[in-house]
Image: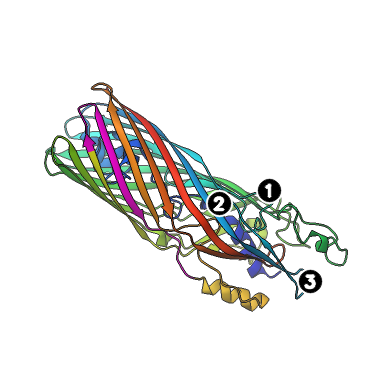
Amino acid sequence: MNKKYLRHAVLAAAIGSVSQGAMAAGFYLQETSASGLGRAFAAENTIGDNASILARNPAGSALFDTYTISGGLTYVDPNIDVSGDVTYFGPIPGTRTTVRADADDYATSAWIPNGYLAAPINDEWSWGLAMYTDFGLETDFPDSFPAAAIANQTELLTVNIQPSIAYDINNTFSIGASINFLYADATLKTNIPTDFVLDPIFSNPAVLGRGLSGASVLKIEGDGWDVSWTLGALWRISDNTRAGISYHAKYDPKLKGDVSSDLIPPPPAAPFDDTSGNLTLDLPDTLELGFYHRFDNQWAVAVGYMWTNWEEFERLEAFIPSAGEGFNPLLIKEENFKSGSRFSLAGEYFYNDDITVRFGYAYDQGAARDGFNRHEQEEILATTGLDLPITWRTLSIPDTDRQWLTLGGTYQYNEKLSVDAGIAYIWGDDERIQEYTPIPVPTYYDGGTTKTEAWLFSAAINYRF
């Protein structure tokens, strides 16, 4: 196997370690509050009905005249199904074997916590502290999945710790800034399918002399930190109207960990065995705009817009010092994401002084490009003679445009304590997915998603001291 396709083998497996966020553009997570979920996160950087605004806009602490805390939990239950065929080319020249490759509900459910504190210093200055997550979730295909060498188990966990400070000008305009500390932990596992259909051929002494069922293609575990920043501003146009703008700078965390494999590098070299390696993630910057207006004692409207600069996420590259010259940096995956926008609209109905009802809609543009990766197609054709269409969209990132419908509310228990709840249904279009890996033999997946949907449930408690 030449070095170019060894790179592609690592590529095909490793992309999953950062791509599990199946229910937001790319793998970005919106879920920063229960009240925001009820509004489809429209104008979440503007409204400030609780301290969770600090996740979106550091200027938000200027809205509070007393110490205020918020804490919540969101349960994300995605459901993604794929259906297709896997074709193995070889190992005897000129032969090919095709089997069905279907998987149901392979995006794993997750709990997403958050916590916030907004604190005034004096009439002009205030500070805040936010803890939440921006990126993550998990995909988990069965070990028997015929394309398990392309995508099996992947997991990404991130935690963002964000201290901030804000300055209020004449109780009308406030500005804020934060320092963002991001911790990321990633785990990846890909393997030869159990009950590998080609094992009888590989077991022939003239071919390999042993079966490969269940052999590890690649296992990566790593974690790391990065520091970034956020700027924001709020304009309280009137008692009933306000607008907000915030910008979150990009992250480039460098994950350090171990790489293991039963097959990489191929013989006669010794396979990786808890070998030290580094992986850099290019996580995007975002710009968010919000507008909120309360018409009367009963009705209000919120409008939101978010732009995410996914152009930063062009490729994954790893550095494995022991791999030697020719593999560093090791090109893992050309993703070529495209930037996209999220549009949201919400209404609020104030039933009485104690009960608020919310509803919202959002349209979230996906980050994966439509069409085909012509460059990889040409490389496969030049190396193997196989003319195979390869999509930018992958099993690990079955990304598509999504729509949100949400409902939520707040119960004001007393002047200090309130409780929020929200629910959302998200769905996306079915998309074509075609992928290739050369390990253990040239393996080609041809299929697509047959279901992309999720339910989100969130609850939170807010307290003003």
Q: Which residue is mark 1?
A: 274
Name the front one of labels 1 and 3: 3
Q: Quadrant of residue 39?
A: top left
Which residue is at a point 25% across and 29% down the rendered structure image? 355
Q: Is residue 282 magenta?
A: no
Q: Could you tell me if residue 294 is visible in this image?
A: yes
Residue 266: percent from the left, percent from the top? 74, 62
Confirm or deny contact between disc 1 and disc 2 (CB under 8 A).
no
Q: Which residues are magenta?
A: 349-371
Q: Which residue is mark 2?
A: 17
Which residue is at a point 31% across and 49% down the rendered structure image? 361
Q: Which residue is mark 3?
A: 92
Name the mark on residue 373.
none
Q: Quadrant of residue 416?
A: top left
Placement of the C terminus among the 4 image quadrants: top left
Relative to 130, 386 lies left or right: right
Q: CA distance from mark 1 to mark 2?
A: 17 Å
Residue 81: percent from the left, percent from the top? 55, 53
Residue 306: percent from the left, percent from the top? 31, 53
